[in-house]
Image: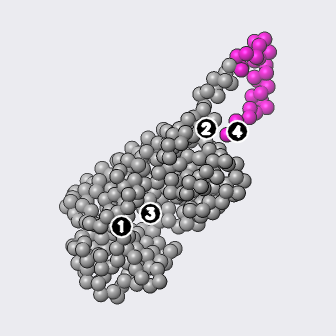
Amino acid sequence: MRRLLLTAAAATAAALTLAACGTTEPATDAAAAKKTTERITLTDASGTKVELDGPAKKVVGTEWHEVELLISLGVDPVGVADVKGYKTWDSAVPLKNEPKEIGTRGEPSMDTIASLKPDLIVASTDLPAAAVKQMRKVAPVLEVRSADASDPIGQMKENVDLIAKATGTTEQAEKLKDGFDAKVAEGKKALADAGLAGAEFAFADGYVVSNQVSVRPFTSGSLIGAVSEELGLKNAWTVKGDKDYGLGSTDVEGLTKLGDVQFAYIANDGDKSSTPFTENGVLAKDKVWTSLPFVKKGNVHRLPDGIWMFGGPESMNQYIDTLVAALTK
């Protein structure tokens, strides 16, 4: 990372001070001390040692989870993968600048990233190792594990801390984590006051591909699932989720195993394939769907568009607010 240059005025003042002292040694010592103080050494999620000359300012983000955390910490990324997709799916933490489009989340453009001359590239461990290896030739790369089904909330907070250390924003990181904890406590109380403590709950999203509906259950190992349980709800899914994101897979028939639950989902009008559960979706006249107990009772809750289900503390705060409002209305 390039050092910030002294302004002409500051340089002049420094020269006058040195002339008065009659030696340049104090300035040399001060510069050396500053360099030692600013240097940052981290170990990322891949176990790689990452060294920075100082807090990263020009940062590229290859995955939306990491992009959200950067913005939440006060760092506007200069490069983002799939900018349009981020704007569609993450409304809790909108982009404040106009970052350069660096390609897709799975295949970022190395040439575009290199042209930005970043201080740091924050990348998900979901990226192929070969891609990360290429990026390390461009700039330091901080790999972040976007999700861990064994401890979803703990992983989210760990990611906040890791990126904060790399960007010199640890104070803001503490505020983010404290705000999330307070929001959980607030939401849990609201649900308990409404008599919903321990209520059976299922969250899912769904997609239509070639006229076939695929349902994706968010198990206890998902971030959404873990937050829901922290709110005092009982996850009704019995399917097994993957080891990272805690996501399962089923179809409309699989929903019959849920029983009488509160069912919530997130869709997005900007992505028509994600709307099978909506009033005008492909399931609206499906006999299996319409016969489900929670559908008959009206216990199907569409949460607002733009809540990123794999985001950070601010997306989860948004999820809590909208879920509590939906369940207690």
Q: In the figure, residue 301 lies in which quadrant?
A: bottom left
Residue 224 visible in the displayed image: no
CA separation in Å, label 1 and label 4: 45 Å
Residue sitting at x 25%, y 72%: 258
Q: In this view, does 281 lie above or below 45?
A: below
Residue sitting at x 60%, y 31%: 38
- Nearest to the eye among marks 2 and 3: give it: 2
The three-letter amino acid code for the residue at tag 2 is Leu
- Nearest to the eye among marks 1 and 4: give it: 1
The three-letter amino acid code for the residue at tag 1 is Gly
Q: In the figure, residue 57 lies in which quadrant?
A: top right
Q: What stretch is highlighted in magenta?
A: 1-28
Q: Mark 3 points at which residue?
A: 307
Instruction: Pick whichever of labels 4 and 3 is earlier in the sequence.
Output: 4
- Residue 159 position, x and y percent, is 46, 47
Q: In this view, does 257 lie above or below 317?
A: below
- SS label for mark 1: loop
Q: Mark 2 points at which residue?
A: 52
Q: How crowded is mark 3: few (under 14 residues within 10 Å), some or many (20 or more)?
A: many
Looking at the picture, tell me which residue is in the foreground, 17 or 159.
159
Instruction: Pick whichever of labels 2 and 4 is earlier in the sequence.
Output: 4
Instruction: Pick whichever of labels 1 and 2 is earlier in the sequence.
Output: 2
Q: Name the residue under label 4.
A: 2
CA separation in Å, label 2 and label 4: 10 Å
Q: Which numbered dot is residue 248?
A: 1
Indicate whether residue 84 is drawn in magenta: no
CA separation in Å, label 1 and label 3: 19 Å
Q: Residues within 10 Å of mark 1 (few under 14, many from 20)?
A: some
Q: Residues within 10 Å of mark 2 (few under 14, many from 20)?
A: some
